[in-house]
Image (cartoon, rainbow, N blue to C red):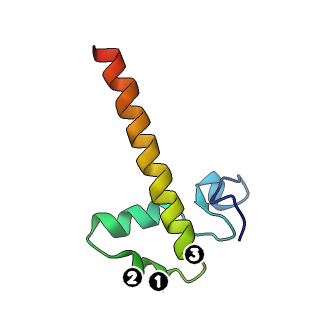
Amino acid sequence: MNSKVINIDSEILGGTPVFSGTRVPIKNLFDYLETGDTIMNFLEDFESVKKEQVISVLQMSEKLIENSTNILNENFT
C-alpha cells in the first residue's frame, strides 16, 4: 500500500483531501463517526478505502489534536 494516506490534488475533487488512491474525502469518515456509524460501516460503503488508511488518518488526527492542545496551552500560560 502507498505510504501516503491523504492526497490533496487540485485535479481530484478540487483539492479536497481524499484517501490516497481514491476519490473519497477524508471528511466523509468524520461525518460517519459523528453520526454514530462505525468504521466498518464506512469501509463497507467506501470499499476503495482500506482499514489501515482509516486507522492512519485517525492516528494523525489524534497527534494533530495533541499538538494543537500543547501549542494553545503554551499560549495561555
Residue ranking furthest to the top: 77
Look at the image and tell me in which quarter the C terminus lies.
top left
Please, what is the three-letter code of the amino acid marked with disc 3? Val
Label 3 residue SS: loop
> In the drawing, does residue 56 fall left or right of residue 15?
left
x and y, in percent, of residue 54 in the image: 50, 67
Residue of label 1: 45
Q: Which residue is mark 2?
A: 41
* SS under mark 1: helix
- Tell me where residue 65 sits by quadrant: top left
Whole-angstrom CA distance, mark 1 to mark 2, is 6 Å
Q: Report the quarter where the N terminus lies.
A: bottom right
Residue 15 lies, in percent from the top left, at 64, 52
Which image quarter: residue 2?
bottom right
Q: What residue is disc 3 on?
A: 49
User: How far is mark 2 from mark 3, CA to CA?
Assistant: 12 Å
